[in-house]
Amino acid sequence: MKRKLITCYLLLFTAFTFAQEKSLNSPDGKLALTVKLTDGKISYTVLYNNIMMLEDSPLGLISNVGDFSKELSIHSTENNTIDKKYKQDRIKQSTINYEANELTITLYNKEKQQIEVVFRISNNDIGFRYNLPQFGETASCIIEKEITGFNLPEETTTFLSPQATPGIGWKRTKPSYEEEYVPDEPSSTPSKYGQGYTFPSLFHVGNNGWVLVSETGVSSKYCASHLSDGTKEGVYSIAFPQEGENNGFGSTTPAISLPGSTPWRTITISNNLKPIVETTIPFDLVEPLYEPSQEYKYGRSTWSWIMWQDNSMNYDDQVTYIDLAAEMGYEYILMDALWDTQVGYDKIPELIKYAQSKGVDVFLWYNSNGYWNNAPQGPKHKMDNSISRKEEMKWLQSLGVKGLKVDFFGGDKQETMKLYEDILSDANEYGLMIIFHGCTLPRGWERMYPNYIGSEAVLASENLIFNQHFDDMEAYNACLHPFIRNTVGSMEFGPVLLNKRHNRTNDGGTTRKTSDIFQLATAILYQTPVQMFGIAPNNLTDVPAFEIDFMKEVPTTWDETVFIDGYPGKYSVLARRHKDQWYVVGVNAQKEAIKLNVNLPMMAGKDVKLYSDNKKSEPQFSETKIKNSGSVNLTIQPNGGIIITE
């Protein structure tokens, strides 16, 4: 009799446990999400090909109107399918077909207040967020803490960039997402500043695969987040901005109107790096927030500041770079910081008119500053409030300026997110494209804001001028970006520095360690729809003509991106297609040349141009034919590159 009672109890317990679990699979069945409620707490696990990639990971949040982290019960669940086709002209792929399975779990807390957790799972990608209804007459709330975590298996190593302490760095401009990555670091290693890690965050789960964690859909309605330091068990949690960001102004916790939603947390998972590099999940989960006021034109730009620095911001030097843009057939010139005083508000219209007479349009630099750091460059106090901003933008529109590069932001608080959105939405009204610099990571913004172009949020090319260390590490960093930073959003790097020495006369300053072909390859490797290239006027005569010819023809928008081969921090080989033309590029950060056999079906049987380095890192150009099988043997020299194009 006792044995029968035990058997009945076990059956009841099993049924109860089953009732508290809900599973959701990707369309191809390889990615499996299980959500469960245990002792009133909700969590999730993720398997890929039946291998655990995320262990029991917490969910929930705490608000000032209710605690949704404990004593929860499942009220209902609902399943849907998502089939969305859209076009996007500023990311790694122009036509996207997003297919996903959706699960909405409605929970009640002990006060019978409701919260929904919405999961969408596509092949290799998971997105989830929280929805809160209005609670009676309570039409807003503060999210005091997000419990959301990511529990990585014990064998995991990390590729993470630390979140900087607010107010450190040059003129107190950090955090600006410009910290260095540590490759294959043991999980749960404390971060450099003790402030956790920035998105996106890449994890290598032993021999089992890869996990990329980030977020998307962050607007003025929420703050941007990052990851906490990992616990000893390997749990990394959502962390809100720090008190000192934005010079201490604004709340570290987000406020939302009700009904309302949090941003999407995103996870990309695979047993190989191809889905990590090719993911479109930051854009799949969001929608445009407003219509474009006009059709925006993307392209290439010259930029005097990167090589000639502050003193080049004068009328004559800008004419030189306008002429360089015209010679190269480029669409734009960027006139960087200090134009307001060193060219002057009275002379800049004349300079813009000269550029337009040469078929070159203009981007102008602005300091975002109100009060959040001490960055001195002007123009200042033009972008930080709506009155001055709209007045300035109306004037810029009258001159035919096409875009702005806005610099030196203060952090990730909701207050700062609102400033980003206000600049973008106001600029659209005046037909202006926007690039952000000294800034946060973009989070789905290419799709959300039609005039958004790109963000720095990386150790960009300016650091090659400032410090030899970054020249020594240039190839290593280049072999990280396609897998981490640039895979989730447009990256305004300012690539292709063909001077051997980084100064005006090519004979002083820091020394470039990478080859010319490596530099050309970064024009393809780094994705953003308006590229501010670092070429200088002297390059028209002091590098081989085939390099300049390549730079005259290189596109900046892509219809398709395909990962070919690579490992973060070691080497990277990508293929990108612009219209009917394919480009395959590779770069190598290792101390020895690498020999690869790769399959390029998109070029099978075709005549192609080959750009490569010899053993002395000297540039070479030849023409060849790809085998009908598409099989190609590649040799990429250390600190070198390779390019194959039709």
Image (cartoon, rainbow, N blue to C red):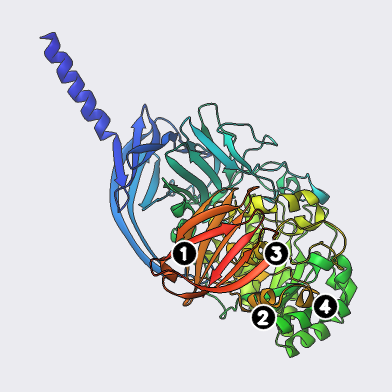
| Residue identified by numbered label 4 | 318
Question: Which of the 4 image quarters holds residue 10?
Answer: top left
Q: Residue at x 61, y 31 (%)?
A: 189
Nearest to N terminus: mark 1 or mark 3: 1
| Residue identified by numbered label 3 | 618
**Gap between marks 4 and 3 measured at Cα:** 31 Å
- The residue under label 1 is which amino acid type? Glu
Tell me: residue 530, above or below residue 134.
below
Query: Given the current orientation, which residue lies at the most extreme front position?
Result: 615
Tell me: residue 174, above or below residue 377.
above
Question: Which of the 4 image quarters holds residue 613?
Answer: bottom right
603 horizontally vs 391: left or right? left
- Say which element carries label 4: helix
| Residue identified by numbered label 1 | 287
Nearest to N terminus: mark 1 or mark 2: 1
| Residue identified by numbered label 2 | 331
Q: Residues within 10 Å of mark 3 (few under 14, many from 20)?
A: few
Nearest to N terminus: mark 4 or mark 2: 4
**Gap between marks 3 and 2 measured at Cα:** 30 Å
Front: mark 1 or 2: 2
- The residue under label 4 is which amino acid type? Gln
Check the picture and name the quadrant holding the N terminus: top left
Front: mark 1 or 3: 3
**Gap between marks 1 and 3 measured at Cα:** 47 Å
Q: Position of residue 460 (x, y in %)?
A: 70, 57
**Gap between marks 4 and 1 measured at Cα:** 39 Å
Front: mark 3 or 2: 3
Front-most of residues 531 and 644:
644
Front-most of residues 113 and 26:
26
Q: Residue at x 86, y 66 (%)?
A: 310
- The residue under label 2 is which amino acid type? Glu
